[in-house]
Image (spheres, grey):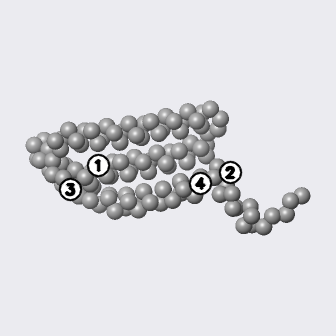
Amino acid sequence: MAYMTDRKRVEGLGSAKSGTAQHWTMTVTSVALLILTPFFLAIVGGLLGQPHAAVVASLSRPIPALVVAAFLVVGLHHMRLGMQVMLEDYLGGFARKLGVIASTILCYALAAAGVVALAQIAL
């Protein structure tokens, strides 16, 4: 029987040895989204009901385009991390690996598609 102190048990950072980094990344992206969301809503909310030309003119300016792009990239990265945690908690074996890979591809594909679409509008 091994006798270990509480500190000795947790020094290994857990079984996966990466939980702290993922938690920290989730925290940072949450704070970034907390800051970006009001700006995103102000930009997009002001464009609701506007004609196509007004939307293109607004998103062609650098600051609104950067805010929308940052919101897309940070939001979808945060979503990927959250989906990964959920899949790791509730799935096992091959389904877990497949789910994490599929959700990662989906989130990065959506982010890339959003940034490309925004670039086409802005340029």
> Quick check: 28 left or right of 121?
right
CA gap between label 1 and label 4 equals 28 Å
> Counting other residues with Cα less than 10 Å from the Cα at mark 2, is it few (<14), some (14-19), or many (20 or more)?
few
Mark 1 and mark 2 lie on one chain; the one further toward the N terminus is 2
The local secondary structure at tag 4 comes to: helix
Question: Residue flagged by tag 1: what amino acid is it?
Answer: Ala
The local secondary structure at tag 2 comes to: loop
Q: Which mark is residue 19?
A: 4
CA gap between label 4 and label 3 equals 35 Å
> Quick check: 44 left or right of 77?
left
Query: Is 42 placed above or below 89 here?
Result: below
Nearest the camera: 15 or 52?
A: 15
Query: Is 54 placed above or below 30 here?
Result: above
> Quick check: 51 left or right of 68?
left
- What residue is shown with label 2? 15
Determine the residue positioned at 26% across, 54% down.
67
The quarter of the displayed image where residue 110 is located: top left
Question: Residue flagged by tag 3: what amino acid is it?
Answer: Ile
> Counting other residues with Cα less than 10 Å from the Cα at mark 4, is it few (<14), some (14-19), or many (20 or more)?
few
Judge whether residue 85 can be spotted in this image. Answer: yes
Question: Residue flagged by tag 2: what amino acid is it?
Answer: Ser
Nearest the camera: 98 or 89?
A: 98
Whole-percent x and y of residue 19?
A: 59, 54
CA gap between label 1 and label 2 equals 36 Å
Mark 1 and mark 3 lie on one chain; the one further toward the N terminus is 3
Q: Which mark is residue 69?
A: 1
Determine the residue positioned at 59% across, 44% down.
88
Whole-percent x and y of residue 30?
A: 43, 59
